[in-house]
Amino acid sequence: MLDKPGGSAAAVPLLFHDQHTQHDRDPQALGERLARHHPVLDFAPRRGHEAGFVHRTNTIRAGSLLLTSGYSSPIEGAMGEDKGNAYVNLCLAGSIRYQTQGLSQAITPSRPLWFSPGATYRFTTDHLNALVMRLDLERLRSTAAAIAGLGVSQQRFASDLEVARVFGCENRRSLQLIQVFRRTLSLLDNPDLDTHGHQDVLQVDDLIYRVFALLLHPRLDTVLAVHRQGGVAPRERIFEDLLEWIRANLHTPINLTEMERRSGYSRRTLQLAFKQRFGCGPVQWVRRQRLELARQALLRPQPGDTVGEIASRFGFGNLASFSRDFSAHFGLRPSELMHEGRRQLC
């Protein structure tokens, strides 16, 4: 056996084409080859394991996906930022530890799956048998939106893809989806599929993207449950959640881009939804809410309050603009209302 004796991962076969693998014993040459396709910052055998270095891999394409299954003696290194892509690593045997986004995370056969949203990371491995692949983040978002069928923007699913995570077998849902992923990979171990051109017809890459859309976006389960019961997608709940968030954050800057990201609605859909509900656009509605809160504060001024301080408290950076809008909306100047409020408190 070419692998180092005693390596826990050495006896575990690779996920596909185990008998037809590429062997590397020169870590520098391997690191240079990897750097042609990935943002490799550092790659080397772990200290004390230089002499026994061995790397055995097999790479296969499934549609747009490139998947690499491999065994390696202990290594360490770092990967740079890869915007627009995510890395997935599935551990079959051994272990690997990552440092990324201020976190230290490890995968083992009991917690086997690691997802990273293209952020810079460092890694240190034991004898490792694993699979690595790179996913397109935009395609993940669009796949999640297609599964949901809500008619909302794929941006609704963006926040789920911003943090590195480990998925383990302790969660039944995650375990089931990881098992589906592994069974899907077994399709790649059939050379006849490539020979007859069936690989592209089966669209295994689409299936993998759907599995990861479900794994990374647990909220999709609620949507699918509604569909199974013959109900309608909870579009109203999405809109109410957005309104609740806006009301809780009126003291901070809120723009249409943030509303799109929070709700998942496109800009046009937001405009229509606010027009139907309130008779105005979203920006106008936010401004009205701020004016109403300012009115209430002016009617009940605290000692030391000024018109300018109250305007700033509710997101109005320009006092002249606030006074003009307030007068147009309520028919009197904010200073007049504050004077009336102080009089009533006396």
Image: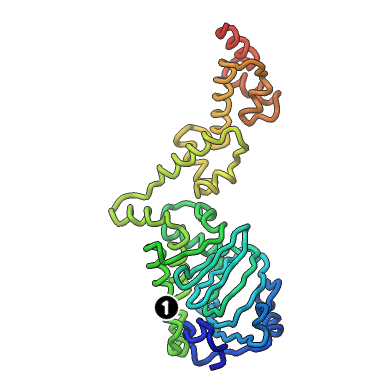
Q: Position of residue 267 (x, y in %)?
A: 55, 46
Q: Is residue 64 visible?
A: no
Residue 146, above or below 95: above
Q: Going 50% across and 92% down the picture, which residue do you hit?
A: 19
Q: Is residue 88 visible?
A: yes
- Crowding at mark 1 (Cα within 10 Å: few <14, some 14-19, many 20+): some
Q: Quadrant of residue 87?
A: bottom right
Q: Going 52% across and 49% down the picture, which residue do you hit?
A: 266
Q: Nearer the viewer, residue 108 or 182?
A: 108
Residue carrying label 1: 202
Residue type, label 1: Leu
Q: Nearer the viewer, residue 110 or 216?
A: 110
Q: Going 61% across and 21% down the picture, which residue do you hit?
A: 326
Q: Quadrant of residue 236?
A: top left
Q: Position of residue 112 (x, y in %)?
A: 48, 70
Q: Position of residue 154 (x, y in %)?
A: 51, 55
Q: Position of residue 291 (x, y in %)?
A: 58, 25
Quadrant showing the C terminus: top right
